[in-house]
C-alpha cells in the first residue's frame, strides 16, 4: 500500500511553533510535487505550501514568512515548519503528493492554536 501519514500536529499557543512531518511508505516520492493543505471546520480546503521535484517552493500569502516547506529525502518526502502560529492557522493539515495522474493524500493531522 502506498500511503502518506502526517504527524507533528497538536495544541500550541499563539506565537508558538510546530513541525509537521509526512512519512511515506510503499513508494518513492522524489519525482512528485509535494504539498501541504489545510481545512478548517466550515471552510474550503486551501493550499498552504508546495514544493516541486526541483525544490521550488510556493506559499499561500497567509503563511509567507512564517511557514517553511522542505524535503527530507533521507526519511520523509516533505516537512512543514510552522512558526509564529496564529489562531486562524487552526485546521487539519494534509500532506499531498502529485505526479502526472498520481494524486495521493494523507489522513491529516490536527493543528490547534489557542491560548
Image (cartoon, rainbow, N blue to C red):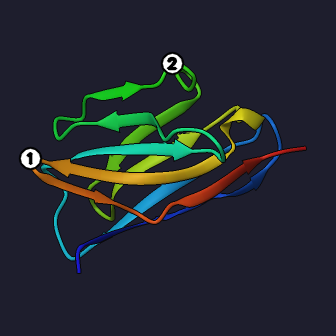
Closer to the chain start, of discs 2 and 1, is 2
- Which residue is tagged 2? 61
| Most foreground residue, 114 or 76 | 114
Residue 86 to residue 96: above or below: above
| Most foreground residue, 88 or 81 | 88
Q: For the residues marked 2 and 1, what is the alpha-carbon distance in whole angstroms?
A: 26 Å
Q: Residue at x 49, y 41 (%)?
A: 45
Considering the image in quadrants, where does the N terminus appear?
Answer: bottom left
Residue 101 in the image, given as x and y percentages of width and height = 10, 51
Residue 14 in the image, given as x and y percentages of width and height = 81, 37
Q: Residue at x 43, y 26 (%)?
A: 59
* Image-based side of 87 in relation to 53, left or right: right
| Most foreground residue, 74 or 114 | 114
Location of residue 5 by image quarter: bottom left
Residue 42 to residue 28: above or below: above
Q: Which mark is residue 100?
A: 1
Q: Residue at x 53, y 51 (%)?
A: 93
Amino acid at each position: 500500500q502506498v500511503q502518506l501519514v502526517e504527524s507533528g500536529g497538536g495544541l500550541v499557543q499563539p506565537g508558538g511553533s510546530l513541525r509537521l512531518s509526512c512519512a511515506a511508505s510503499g513508494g518513492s516520492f522524489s519525482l512528485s510535487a509535494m504539498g501541504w493543505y489545510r481545512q478548517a471546520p466550515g471552510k474550503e480546503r486551501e493550499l498552504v505550501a508546495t514544493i516541486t521535484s526541483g525544490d521550488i517552493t510556493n506559499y499561500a500569502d497567509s503563511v509567507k514568512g512564517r511557514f517553511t516547506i522542505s524535503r527530507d529525502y533521507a526519511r520523509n518526502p516533505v516537512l512543514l515548519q510552522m512558526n509564529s502560529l496564529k489562531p486562524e492557522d487552526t485546521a487539519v493539515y494534509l500532506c499531498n503528493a502529485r505526479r502526472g495522474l498520481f494524486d495521493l493524500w494523507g489522513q491529516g493531522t490536527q493543528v490547534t492554536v489557542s491560548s
